[in-house]
Structures are given as C-alpha cells and as structure tokens.
C-alpha cells in the first residue's frame, strides 16, 4: 500500500500508539472520475474524521489524490480500461468501513465484500442481495450519484462541494488559454483542425495559448499547435502525462481551459478556473461542470436529449460533438468572466488538516 499522505496513529490512552480505523474507498478509474468523487470523499472525511482514508485507485493518480487533501494513502490498482480490478493488495486487518464509489454491480461489490469490512456503503443490486443500499439511477450526474449514496447511509454530502486546494508551484504559462484536444475515446474528441482554428484565432487576438497532451497524445497536440501557428514550446506533455503538480499549476493559473468531456475539464472545475467544455455523445447533465458563469457548456443534442444518445467509447467523433462550430467556441472563450483573484475556498473536511 503506497503512501500519499500519512497521519500519525492515535493513542490508546496509555501512551502507546494504536492503529487508526481504516476507511477503504474504491474508485479505480481516471483523473476526472477521482475529481467528480471529491464531494463524496469530503463527506466521508467529515463524517469519519478519525479514520485513515485509503483510496483504491491507479497508482498514476497518487499525486492527484494527495492534492485533494482528503486521502491518507493510495492503494494502487491495476485493471484494463474502466474494468473493476480483479483483486486489491490489501494487508492487515479488515477495513472498518468500505465505500464502493466505482460502480453498481457484483464485480465491485464482491471485490470489497471479500475483504469483510465492518460496514459497506454501496448501491443495491439483485445479484448482491446482502447489500441494503439505494436504487441506482441511470439519469443522474456523477457527483450527485455518490452524494445520494452516502445520504442514504445518513452521511450529508453536497455535490457542488468540488473545490480542491491550489498547488504551491508556479505555472509554466500563467494567464494562458489552455487547449486540450485529447480524450480517451474518439467519440469525445473534437476534430484537431477545429481545435487548431480555435487556438489560432485566440493566439492572433493576443492570448497566450498552451496545448496540453496526455501520454501518447504528442502527435495530436503538435498538429494542433502547428496548424494554429503557435510558437515553439506551446505544447506541454505528450510523451508522458504532464506531472500532476505542473498540470494543476497551469490550469489553476490559466485564463481558461478549452476541452472536451475529459479529466482536464474536471480539474478546471475543481480549481475554479473558467472553462469551455465541448460535449458529445454524453449529456452534460451527467458529467458537466456546476451551472455557474465561469463554465460554458456547449451541447447540441438535436432531437435526442437523452442522457447518453451516443456511444461514449466509439472510435469516431460523435455527431453531437461535430455540431459545435469553431466560432461558437471562440465566442464562448471571449465572453467568459475573468478568473477570480482568489482561488476557491475549500470547505473544511474535519478537525484535522489533511
């Protein structure tokens, strides 16, 4: 079990250290998934301030998990795509409490049940009848979903309580417009020539523009930067993911972020940075930012305004995404409010600073 932020054990009263009770949270997904779970993590932290909160998630999220200020340790997981891990490398006594914030189904339920936690928070499912949780809803925002789960168990949670602290490092491009053309599926990837047209228009109007890239997205980002006429050095990342602290500093001190429905959009939300988020094929009512002026959502469902009118994991850009025009994105950026001079205040999660 790797450490992301460690707290001292409590005392038994006779001066000897006793292990703290442990709360295991399963959220073995990506960066955006972690950040949408922040309201639920904060509610658990507030409700169980004496527990060590152990997050089961991919090891690459260690720095991001620590940056939330809510996680004591990361338990690294391995799984393909969005699959449930086959096992958890848990050691020591059974967890006192476990929370399934991963999904709704026997694989994640049984994975946690095998560890025999004292209490398990999870949605009900007919194939795991021993769990007396709430009923799963398909048409529900991801942040609200996990807050409703906890509310069923008597734990108050606010789905708009999304803020994380700013990182204490300088931005590589303070005040820049951050353009992120990548996504983990083609269906949510707006065409690169359109991202380039947006980046070029903003650059020509005087904005400093940075193009960010995740691991393996270097060719895509370099194409966008080249077609936009951006200066050398405008691309950040590509061979590997940008280290989280550097990425969070860039986003947290940016003029705004232009991005599809992916992790960087949720990072902008968490840091209070203005954003323009391009949606398709999944509705923003499932994954969009809070409805505040600093975030602009672009979504053209046509005649089908169902929550998932298209295939979120398809190989080609979704037709709803293609309905978003270049001029629409440029205008949205130009009409965004300026970032607030003070970063968002994070509500206290408990009596201790995490």
Image (cartoon, rainbow, N blue to C red):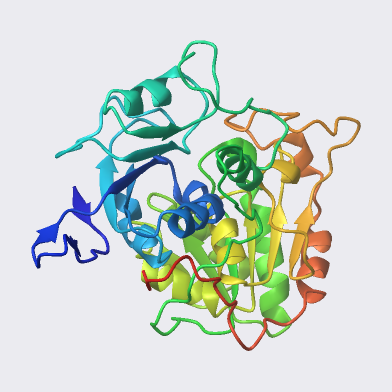
Residue at the image position 76 percent from the left and 35 percent from the top: 319
> Residue 318's image quarter?
top right
Is the residue 239 above or below the residue 312 in the image?
below
Residue 170 point in image, percent of width and height:
42, 85
Q: Is residue 156 above or below residue 312?
A: below
Q: Which of 112 and 334 is in front in this view?
A: 112
Q: Is residue 70 above or below residue 232?
A: above
Q: Where, by quadrant of the figure, is residue 208 drawn? A: bottom right
Q: In this view, does 57 lie above or below 213?
A: above
Please tell me how many numbered marks the rendered image carries. 0
Residue placed most toward the observer, 309 or 54? 54
Q: Which of 124 and 224 is in front in this view?
A: 124
In this view, which residue lies farthest toward the bottom?
341
Q: Residue drawn at (53%, 50%), measured in percent from left and top? A: 40
- Say whether residue 70 is left or right of residue 146: left
Estimate the x, y position of residue 258 in percent, counting from the top left: 65, 63
Res 52 → quadrant: bottom left
Residue in the picture at 59% in, 65% down: 268
Image quadrant in which the C terminus is located: bottom left
């Amino acid at each position: 079990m790797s450490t992301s932020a460690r707290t001292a054990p409590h005392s038994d009263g006779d001066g000897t250290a006793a292990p703290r009770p442990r709360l295991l949270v399963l959220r073995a997904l990506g960066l955006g998934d972690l950040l949408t779970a922040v309201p639920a993590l904060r509610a658990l932290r507030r409700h169980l301030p004496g527990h060590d909160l152990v997050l089961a998630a991919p090891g690459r999220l260690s720095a991001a998990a620590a940056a939330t200020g809510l996680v004591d340790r990361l338990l690294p997981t391995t799984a393909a795509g969005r699959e449930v891990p086959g096992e958890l490398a848990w050691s020591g006594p059974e967890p006192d409490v476990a929370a399934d914030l991963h999904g709704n189904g026997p694989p994640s339920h049984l994975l946690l049940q095998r560890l025999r936690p004292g209490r398990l928070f999870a949605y009900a499912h007919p194939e795991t009848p021993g769990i007396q949780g709430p009923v799963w809803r398909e048409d529900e925002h991801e942040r609200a979903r996990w807050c409703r789960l906890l509310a069923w168990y008597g734990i108050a949670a606010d789905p708009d309580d999304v803020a994380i602290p700013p990182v204490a490092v300088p931005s590589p491009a303070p005040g820049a417009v951050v353009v992120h053309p990548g996504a983990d599926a083609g269906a949510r990837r707006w065409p690169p020539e359109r991202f380039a047209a947006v980046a070029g228009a903003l650059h020509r109007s005087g904005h400093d523009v940075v193009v960010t890239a995740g691991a393996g997205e270097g060719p895509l980002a370099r194409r966008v930067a080249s077609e936009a006429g951006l200066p050398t050095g405008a691309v950040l990342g590509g061979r590997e993911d940008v280290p989280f602290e550097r990425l969070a500093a860039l986003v947290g001190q940016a003029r705004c972020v232009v991005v599809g429905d992916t992790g960087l959009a949720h990072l902008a939300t968490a840091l209070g940075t203005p954003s323009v988020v391009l949606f398709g094929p999944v509705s923003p009512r499932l994954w969009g930012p809070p409805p505040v002026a600093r975030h602009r959502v672009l979504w053209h469902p046509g005649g089908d305004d169902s929550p998932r009118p298209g295939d979120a994991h398809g190989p080609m850009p979704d037709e709803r995404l293609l309905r978003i025009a270049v001029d629409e994105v440029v205008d949205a950026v130009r009409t965004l409010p300026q970032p607030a001079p003070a970063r968002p205040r994070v509500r206290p999660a408990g009596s201790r600073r995490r």
